[in-house]
Image (cartoon, rainbow, N blue to C red):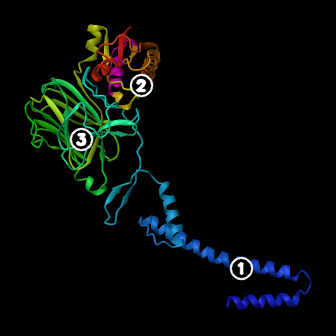
Amino acid sequence: MFCTQLLFHLSSFKNLFMKKSTSFICVSLLSFLFLFSFQNANAQLWKKIKNEVKSRAENNVVNKAGNATDKAIDNTVDATKENKNTNASSNDANGNTAATDTKEKAPSINTYKNYDFVPGDKIIFQPDLSSEPDAELPARFTVNSGNVEIQSYEAEKILHLNPDCGATVSPLMSSENYLPDQYTLEFDMMYENQDGNYFRYASDFYVEFRAPGDNNYHGYPIYKLDINGISKIKFGGANAGIIALQEEITGNTWHHVAIYIRKNIGKVYIDQYRVCATNTLPVGATKVDIKADRYGIKIKNFRIAEGGSDQYKKILTDGKFITHGILFDVNKSTIKPESMGALNEVVKMMKDHNDLNFEIDGYTDSDGNADANLKLSQSRADAVKAQLTKMGIDASRLTTRGFGETNPIDKNDNAEGKANNRRVEFLRK
């Protein structure tokens, strides 16, 4: 029908125009008619695409049929998804929610603004994994069960607890009685979850506190922290209750775990939240291990520190206090968010005692160039002052000095000694 109408129109134009320009006009009209028809057809196609995109976006279903129309729809839907919240979840064929594989933003100091965890005063275990070879057993940990090895991840060496083997590992110490009455334990951990649906129900991870001589790593210890699933924990003896978390623990993301123990008193922090506090812990635990269940676990920045006494009392008796709780990125003066516990303690002390003024002294270990360490320590002291002023302390009450690797308080020939020498001191003026 279309061809018949087109021939009729061309015949009419031929009878009307017999000049030399007739052919040019006919070709132009033919092009116009063809373009008009194509645009109508194309408009119908894109109308179909637009309606389908809307339908698929609303129902969150994309069926890839392989023809040109579906490819256009798929590309449009994908572009729409990219503009949405990167923390959104998607539904599988059974309607179960699974986390999308998007990289979450790193926590900030503002995220930790109410953090009150303060590490112990003296570091007794903080292994340096940086020189250990990949795919080898860790030199500073005892593998009690399953498979555990050193791996490289994101330009760092980490401790890897392999999945599906009940991997259990503990600090390699000279005796089984290394946990004092008062101490803190910290580390960063990451679940390796590949099964988003099952992860919710079988992602248990344990920190187990044991008596000397207890090597039954399949039995119940004196007490333990059980990160149970992604939304709850248990902390205490065998009859400890379940506690809901403020935020769910996600896989493939670093989470900071911090534990404070003083005899029967215990506090647990996960990321910026204090998730548990109890005064009913069974006593007698002298050693600790960590254990994975179904999923692989990455561990880094493992540290045990003794003590955690009142810093104001040290000011009165010693005229200064030392903190290992203000942490920095490697070879930088960027303050880590988990430092906010120690910083909040200083701010509270200075606001409660208006007569307190401090010189902030920065120190490093002996690794690297002495001049570079001197500059780094000064930069870190300045960063601490800047953060304290942001938190409401008048800058006139604070001065800074960098001492680099001088005046060590411990040996620089082992990881723990170096960790103790990397410190910030607050000297009363």
Looking at the picture, how far across and down is residue 338, in whole percent?
A: 34, 31
Q: How many labels does the image show?
A: 3
Q: What residue is pinned by disc 3?
A: 148
Mark closer to the chain start, 2 or 3: 3
Q: Nearer the viewer, mark 2 or mark 1?
A: 1
At 47% from the left edge and 54% from the top edge, which residue is drawn? 84
What amino acid is labelled 2 in the image? Met
**Residue 238 against residue 310 in the figure, above or below:** below
Instruction: State which region is magenta.
Output: 341-359
What amino acid is labelled 1 in the image? Phe
Q: In which quarter of the image is the N terminus?
A: bottom right
Q: What residue is pinned by disc 2?
A: 391
Callouts 2 and 1 close, C-beta under 8 Å: no
Mark 3 closeness class: few <14, some 14–19, many ≥20 residues within 10 Å: many
Under tag 1, what secondary structure? helix
Looking at the picture, how far across and down is residue 242, in whole percent?
A: 17, 45
In the displayed structure, does residue 214 sit left or right of residue 328? Answer: left
Looking at the picture, how far across and down is residue 54, in whole percent?
A: 49, 67
Which residue lies most toward the right here?
Answer: 19
* 345 in the magenta segment: yes
In front of the other: 194 or 137? 137
**Residue 14 against residue 152 in the figure, above or below:** below
Mark 1 closeness class: few <14, some 14–19, many ≥20 residues within 10 Å: few
**Residue 428 against residue 268 in the figure, above or below:** above
At 84% from the left edge and 87% from the top edge, which residue is drawn? 13
Helix, strand or loop: magenta stretch: helix
Under tag 3, what secondary structure? strand
Under tag 2, what secondary structure? loop
In space, the residues marked 2 and 3 are separated at their CA atoms by 42 Å
Q: What residue is pinned by disc 1?
A: 34
In front of the other: 421 or 96? 421
